[in-house]
Amino acid sequence: MTHSHPHSHGHSHDGHRECSTPPPPPGTVDLEQIKREAEARARVEESISDQGEGIPPVVTVTAENLQAEVVVRSEQVPVVVLIGAAGSPDTVRLRMELEEMARAANLHWILAWVDADTQFDVARAFGVQALPTVTAVAMGQPIGQFVGEQTRDYLDQWIAAVHDATKGRLKGLPAGTRMMGEGEDYAGEPNGGMKAPTDDPRLADAEDKLNEGDFDGAVAVYDEILKSEPANAALKAARTNVAFLARAQKIDRSSDPVARADADPKNVELALEAADVEMLVGDPAQSLERLLVLLPTVFGDDRAAVKDRLLDLLQLFDAADPVALDARRRMASALF
């Protein structure tokens, strides 16, 4: 799934940001210019294909190979871009964790490392505000971002969310592609070989609807299966994610939903939309913060709407996530 990003920025024609241009807000990357070049040169895809020795699960990105290793590769599988400082302990720990995960993922996604100290222009192209920053790219577009070192649980969940958001949307690697140093074939499954949460044949129907972008239809199928399997946690989690994507897909992106909400802070409808967008672009703490600040100031139906949306968004977190635990505590004190 590609998300058109709500922000837009002026660029010079060489694809580099003018010095006078302010840095973009966090979570924005405009790779349109590079993407156009990529489409004009399909042979790039050939250059990054398996030439017999397999393809590496971790690549080092420079200005020269950004187009091939990030933009074009992200049309096949998600690319997780880690931008950091090679000497920083935070970056080193996060890099080790992500490299281990990328090797275990067997090419269902690729890790791209950017050393911000030597690749300043690349880091700047991603609108990086702090190091380390991790951005997921699919179809040449950023689909999520987080900043700073995270727990392994958080990383696992974040990668799973990237898979969910790109399921059936990418070409997949050519059949028979191997991971460098591994004898094992990559199955070429565009959904990253994620196992279905149950054996119910109706899941194929949900999968088809997801591939068509019909999130509401997929939610309806999940609801039907959950009637007979109410305790299926994996299915409930899948339904929660898809219902969130269904809702976020309907938000008006003709102007920036976050800016709209900030300009009219008492407007509950706009706040709910902005919180969804912030969650979508990888700023979950800010998403919850927006609604937690609003909650004690509204009453009646508005309060119920904010409370329900908070509960909805909290389902996207691991139960032990400190951000979620803090949000639940603050929510309880606001309500009681």
Image (cartoon, rainbow, N blue to C red):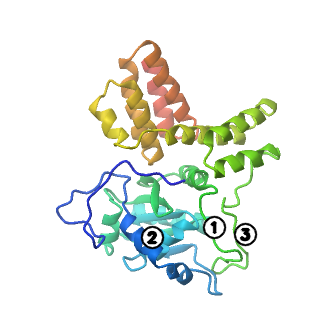
- Mark 3, residues whose alpha carbon is within 10 Å: few (<14), some, or many (≥20)? some
**Identity of the residue drawn at 65% across and 48% down:** 210
Reading the image, the residue beneath label 3 is 187
Circle number at residue 172: 1
Residue 336 visible in the picture: no
Q: Distance between the residues labelled 1 and 3?
A: 9 Å
Residue 119 visible in the picture: yes
Instruction: Name the residue nearer the viewer: 90 or 206.
Output: 206
**Identity of the residue drawn at 79% across and 43% down:** 202
Q: Distance between the residues labelled 1 and 2?
A: 21 Å
**Identity of the residue drawn at 82% across and 32% down:** 228
Is label 1 in contact with label 3 (beta carbons under 8 Å)? no
Q: Quadrant of residue 102?
A: bottom right
- Label located before the other in sequence (1 or 2): 2
Q: Mark 3: which secondary structure?
A: loop
Which of discs 3 and 2 lies nearer the camera? The answer is 3
Reading the image, the residue beneath label 2 is 113
Which of discs 1 and 2 lies nearer the camera? The answer is 1
**Identity of the residue drawn at 39% across and 70% down:** 34
Q: Mark 1: which secondary structure?
A: loop
Q: In which quarter of the image is residue 40?
A: bottom left
What amino acid is at disc 3? Ala
- Mark 1, residues whose alpha carbon is within 10 Å: few (<14), some, or many (≥20)? many
What amino acid is at disc 2? Trp
- Mark 2, residues whose alpha carbon is within 10 Å: few (<14), some, or many (≥20)? many
Circle number at residue 272: none
* Residue 223 percent location from the top left of the image: 72, 33
Name above or below for residue 230 compared with residue 58.
above
- Label located before the other in sequence (1 or 3): 1
